[in-house]
Amino acid sequence: MNRAQAGEKIVRRKLSDQVLERMHDMIRSGELRPGDYMPSERSLMERFGVGRPAVREALQSLHNSGLITINHGERSRVKEINPATILTQSDELARLVLSAAPANLDHLKHARQMFELGMVRVAAEKASEADIAELRDLVALQRSQLGDATAFIGTDMKFHRKIASLTDNPIIVSVSDAMLGWLFEYHVSLLHRSGGEELTLAEHEKIVEHISDHDVAGAIEEMRAHLERTRDVFQMKNGLA
């Protein structure tokens, strides 16, 4: 049998896969919208002419992909679909990739740097007085959290997320959130070892000043120096330099 003939073979698909495809169609078409209850298992069985196992397996697949919620004793609901939905589903896989080789974490830091430099450019161009005040409040909150590494890093993430939000681009915000989340546990341990809290605060204050002055070049250079310092510290602590 040649390759062309082999490619013509009919593959029998699982019933649950076919049910899953139909449910995807229901969500894509708007028949089921975010917040709607999913039809009951019985009505889905009748609609598609399949048994309960196929429906339950398809519903579980929807839940695993983040498209619906399944809570014991409650009917499933359709979740809002946005970029964060997709990225959240890859959290565990991302952590496995990062733990597999230290170099992968450095690649992530480099990718984050590219994002941050673009985001701080937009922030310096368009930040309002209210935005700048919020950034200053976040730096002040961080200063009050000296000695509490987890809280300090949590506010650090809020500071960078605020800068990301000034792009008015939900995909950029979601990707930035995902990268910061993947880095969180590494940042906490790194902060304990490096003692860099005061330097981080000083760098954040300089970034805010450049944004306040709408100094695009200064904001980009300060952000670059800030992120390169943290990359260098990580590399030295992990023998990557």
Image (cartoon, rainbow, N blue to C red):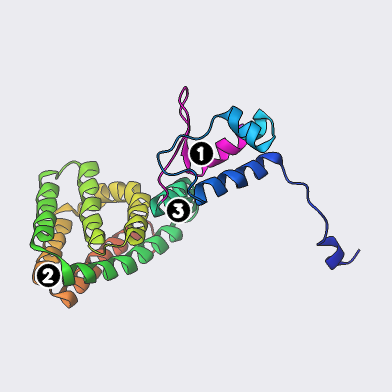
Tags 3 and 1 in contact by the CB under 8 Å rule? no
In this view, the residue in front, 7 or 202, is 7
Q: Which residue is mark 2?
A: 210
Q: Amino acid at mark 1?
A: His
Q: Which mark is residue 63?
A: 1
C-alpha separation, residue under disc 1 versus residue under disc 2: 44 Å
Q: Is residue 117 shown above or below 130?
A: below
Image location (x, y in percent) of residue 100: 50, 52
Is residue 241 visible in this depiction of the protein? no
C-alpha separation, residue under disc 3 versus residue under disc 1: 25 Å
Image location (x, y in percent) of residue 65: 51, 44
Image location (x, y in percent) of residue 91: 44, 48
Q: Is residue 222 left or right of residue 28?
A: left
Is residue 182 visible in this depiction of the protein? yes
- Quadrant of the frame with the C terminus: bottom left
Tags 3 and 2 in contact by the CB under 8 Å rule? no
